[in-house]
Image (cartoon, rainbow, N blue to C red):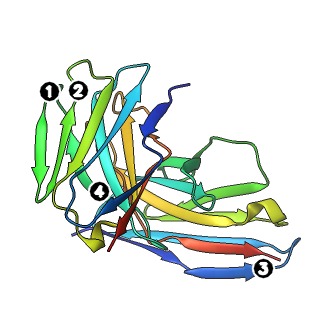
Amino acid sequence: GQQLNQSPQSMFIQEGEDVSMNCTSSSIFNTWLWYKQDPGEGPVLLIALYKAGELTSNGRLTAQFGITRKDSFLNISASIPSDVGIYFCAGQLDRDDKIIFGKGTRLHILP
Amino acid sequence: SQTIHQWPATLVQPVGSPLSLECTVEGTSNPNLYWYRQAAGRGLQLLFYSVGIGQISSEVPQNLSASRPQDRQFILSSKKLLLSDSGFYLCAWNRGGLGNQPQHFGDGTRLSIL
């Protein structure tokens, strides 16, 4: 079945640094989603992308829907302590298809 | 606005005991509903999804079952829990019948089996 490869698996960065993570797939998707999960809570939707090439921002977060429809990246600028958590990418082909989740990128921020 | 509620937030159960986790959605009608399990530090594994009352699709064989007795209520059950059932269980919903819609998650239930 479809799988998403999300990288890196974990990141250790200094506060204030920019962060970049990405997701790739062997097959195309028509929707890419990025979620953040804080410890002990459910994932929260950060950004939804519906069009190849689309670049969307949400505050310090920017995500892009790859032109090939097989990848997406998420950037976080000027990281702060509350950015700590697990970031999941997810893809969906069509309305009746299930959403496929990546295994997550765990972000750690050093003081 | 729409909200999703899961309970209980945490649960400790002995091996072999039954299980019932509940999820309800407010502020929408005819949602798609989903149950996921997340092992510690791992990704999300889809267990069940439902597109309507009484309609349940199972993704993986297991000793868990799901039911949807009402439009906005989704229940995860087991007759006899196994040690391997420990994990973080998440309920999610999205709008049914419309294009590609993102899923929205509840706060989860942490289940520990002793």
The image position of residue B52, as x and y in percent, is 47, 49
Residue at image x 28%, y 27%? A30
Q: Earlier in the sequence, mark 2 or mark 4?
A: 4
Residue at image x 19%, y 36%? A64
| Crowd tier of the residue under label 1, counting other residues whose Cα lies within 10 Å: few below 14, some 14–19, many 20 or above | some
In terms of image quadrants, where is residue A12?
bottom left
Give the residue pinned by disc 2. A66
The image position of residue B25, as x and y in percent, is 39, 68
Q: Chain of mark 4?
A: A
Residue at image x 19%, y 64%? A16
Residues behind callouts 2 and 3 on a single chain: no
Is label 3 in a helix, a strand or a loop? strand
Is label 2 in a helix, a strand or a loop? loop
In this view, the residue in front, B111 or A53, is A53
Q: Chain of mark 2?
A: A
Q: Earlier in the sequence, mark 4 or mark 1?
A: 4
Residue A53 shows which numbered tag?
Answer: 1
Looking at the image, residue B56 lies above or below residue B81: above
Residue B13 shows which numbered tag?
Answer: 3
Q: Chain of mark 1?
A: A
| Crowd tier of the residue under label 4, counting other residues whose Cα lies within 10 Å: few below 14, some 14–19, many 20 or above | some
Q: Amino acid at mark 3?
A: Gln
Q: Amino acid at mark 4?
A: Leu
Residue A45 shows which numbered tag?
Answer: 4
Residues behind callouts 3 and 1 on a single chain: no
